[in-house]
Amino acid sequence: MKPDQKSAKNTATAEDQQQINRFARLHKAYSAAKEKLVSLDNDVNNLNDASDEILLMDDEAAADSIPFLVGSVFVHFDQDTVNGRLELLKVSTQAEMDELRSKVGTMERELGELRAVLYAKFGDNIHLETEEDEESGDATRRNGR
């Protein structure tokens, strides 16, 4: 192949640039969603810990006046009310996590498709992997290197 043919093949068209931009926007959203999932998982763990602590309360007087954060104020509730509120929070957080996991899966598929298309066109002239991908070995599996 002549050098001018090789450079012509690797010239980015407007469509290529749109795909690269789509990949960048999608990757940013994907990273934010993954961080949110970690945060929500921590929230669920904290809610479970709070439920466990309430169950372990021995003092009946303390169990009738448990502080619960509502907005920026602590309101005192009895043990059953707090357990009910914690359970509602866990259910809503789990539902949010399930929805986010579904979105993350969709984003992963689209990112994989865009990677394949862009690596097929640009080969080593484009770098679409993050440090996380490279550390985990995902980059090698995704682009076949």
Image: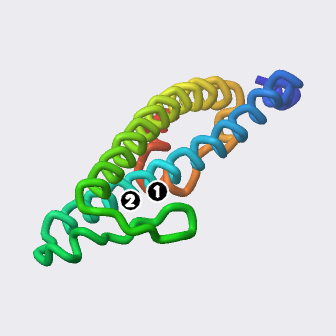
Q: Nearer the viewer, residue 132 or 45?
A: 45
* 106 relative position to 141: left or right: right
Rendered image: mark on residue 39: 1
The spot of residue 82 in percent (x, y) is 31, 58
Quadrant where the N terminus is found in the figure: top right
Counting from the top left corner in percent of width and height, residue 22 is at 73, 32
Please tell me whether mark 2 sits on a helix, a strand or a loop. Answer: helix
Residue 89 rendering spot, x and y as whole percentages: 39, 48
- Residue 142 higher or lower than 35, as above or below: above
Say which residue label 2 marks.
Answer: 42
Residue 101 in the image: x percent, y percent? 44, 35
Q: How many marks?
A: 2
Name the amino acid type tagged 2.
Asn
129 sits to left or right of 139 = right
Taking 85 as reference, is 75 above or below it?
below
Q: Is residue 7 above or below residue 67?
A: above
Q: Residue at x 15, y 63 (%)?
A: 55
Position of residue 114 in the picture relative to residue 47 (left or right) = right
Which residue is more in the foreground, 90 or 108?
A: 90
